Amino acid sequence: MNKEKSLINISKKTFIQVTALLLGLLIVSIVLTYFIPAGSFGVNADGSTDYSVYHTLDGVKGIPVWKGILAPILVFGSSDGVTLIMLSVFLLVISAAFQVMNDAGGIGAIVSAVSDRFKSRRKLMVALISLLFMCFGAFLGLFEEMLTMLPIITMLCLAIGYDSFTGFLICIVSCGFGFASAVTNPFTVLLASEIIGANPMDKIWFRIIIFIVMYMLLLAFIFLYLRKLGKSPENSLTYEHDLRIKATVNVRDSVAEKSPSREKKLRVIYGIFLSVSLILIAVCSSVEAFRSYTVVILIAYFLIFGLLAGILCTSSAKTVFKSFLKGLTGALPTIVFIGLSASIKYVFDEGHIMPTIANQINLLTKGKSLFLIVLIIYAIVLVLEFFISSSTAKAILVMGLLSTVSLGLSDRMMVLIYTFADGYTNVLFPTSPVLLIALSMIGMEYFKWVKKSLPLFAVNFLLVIGFLVLGIVIGY
C-alpha cells in the first residue's frame, strides 16, 4: 500500500489563499454589523417567528469584536453547530475511507473496469455522468453528499485521458446546477412550496424545460473544455495536481500487477461498497423520515464498512488503520474552511442584522412592476446566499417573509425565483464550503475557477433572467 502523500492533499498556496479570502469576508461582515441597524421579527403564540412584524433593536450596535474574531470557533457551538460538526466529521471520514480504498487498490480496480468499457465512448460517458449528477441535485436535493463520489469520478476521468477538472465539472458542478435547476428538490422546491402554500407539482413541465436547457448549457461548457484539453494535456487546469495523483495512483499499472483473482475481489468488494452508498444516499434523500439523518447514516456507513472493505482486501487491519489516519490528516485543513465560511452567518445573527436585511424585501417591492419585483427578490436572495449557504435556513427566512406580503406574483413564481438565486451560486460563491473543499480536492485555486467559469455563469445568468421573464409572461 502507498505510504506517501494522502489522496486528498491541500497545497499550502491553496490553503493560504482560501483562508485569506474568507478572513477578509469575515472582517467585512463584522464591520457591517456596526453600520446596518439591528432588528428582530415578532413571535407568534406558538413560539414560531412572525415575519410580518419587524422591530428595530435600540441600543444594539455591532457584534463584540472579540466574538467576531472567535466566530470560526464559536460557530460550532451555535444553533448551526451540530450541522457544521456533522459536515466536518462527514468530510474527515469520507476522505479517510477513500484513502483506504485508494491504498488497497480499490479505486484502481473500479476505475479501470469502467474506463475499459467506455474507452471508445469517452464523451458519452461524460454526458451520462453529468446527467446523473444533475438528476441527483434536481430530484433528490443532493450536493454535500457528492463529495463522496468526487475522488472516484476524478480518477475515472484521469484513466480515460481527461483530467481532475473534468471530474469536478461532471460531479460537483453538475450536481450544483441540478440543485438549482430544481424539479423536486426537497430542500428548495418542496420546502419553499410548503412554507408559502404552493403546489410543487403544478406546472412542473416548466421546471423540467429549465432543467434540460441548463443541462445543455453545462454540457456545452464541458465539451468546449475537453476540446481544448484534447489539443494538449498541458492545457489542463489541474495539470500539476494530476501529475502528482498519477504518480501516487497509477491506475492501469497498479491493476495490471495484481492477479486476476485479486482484481476480481477488489472490484466485487468495492463495487458493492459504492453501490450500497449510492442506494443509501437515494433512499435517505427520498424518505422523509431518514432525510434529516442522511449525513449521520453516511458517516456510520463509510466509517464501519470503509474499514471493513479495506481489511477484506488487504488482510491487514494495522495497515488499513494507518491508511485511514493518513486520509484524516490530509482532510484536516478543510475544517478551517468550514468554520470560516459558516462564521459569516454567525456574525450576522449575533449582530442582529439579518432581520433588517430581510425586512427590506417589503420596502423595496412596494409599488413596483412585476418584472422589477422579480429582479429585486432575485437580487436579495443572491445577497443572502452569499452569507447563508444553508438552503433550509434561507427558505424559512425568505419564503416565510414572502408568504406574508402581496407582490402580485404566483406562489410558484416566488419558489422559482428562490431556487434560481439559491442554487447556482453554490458552485461560485467562496462562502460555499462544498465548493472550497471540492476545489481543494482537485488542487485548484478558487480565483482560477472563478476566471474559468465566468463565461458559464454569464450565460447562466442571462438564461435565468430570461426564464423569470418568460414565467411572468406565461403566467407561471
Image (cartoon, grey):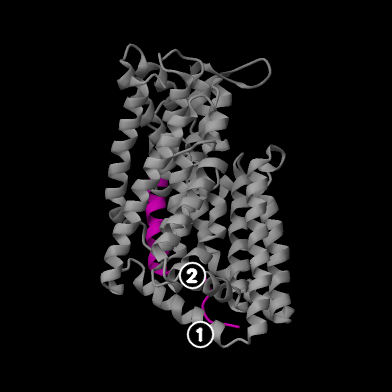
Q: Nearer the viewer, residue 43 or 100?
A: 100
- Residue at disc 2, secondary structure: helix
Q: Nearer the viewer, residue 241 or 120?
A: 120
Q: Nearer the viewer, residue 130 or 400?
A: 130
Q: Indicate the quadrant containing the N terminus: top left, top right, bottom left or bottom right.
A: bottom right
- Residue at disc 1, secondary structure: helix
Instruction: Tell me the kind of residue under disc 2.
Output: Met
Give the quarter of the image for residue 19: bottom left
Give the quarter of the image for residue 375: top left
Q: Which residue is mark 1?
A: 253
Vertical placement of 223 versus 348: above or below? below
Vertical placement of 362 versus 433: above or below? above
Q: Could you tell me residue 319's position as x and y percent?
A: 68, 81
Q: Could you tell me residue 405's position as x and y percent?
A: 46, 14
Mark 1–mark 2 distance (CA, rounded to whole Å): 14 Å
Q: Could you tell me residue 194's position as x and y percent?
A: 58, 25
Marks 1,2: beta carbons within 8 A: no
At 44% from the left and 24% from the top, the residue drawn is 414
At 39% from the left and 72% from the top, the residue drawn is 161
Residue 298 in sight? yes
Provide the residue span drawn in magenta.
1-27
At 47% from the left and 66% from the top, the residue drawn is 154
Vertical placement of 100 versus 439: above or below? below
Residue 155's tag is: 2
At 70% from the left and 43% from the top, the residue drawn is 290
Residue 292 in sight? no
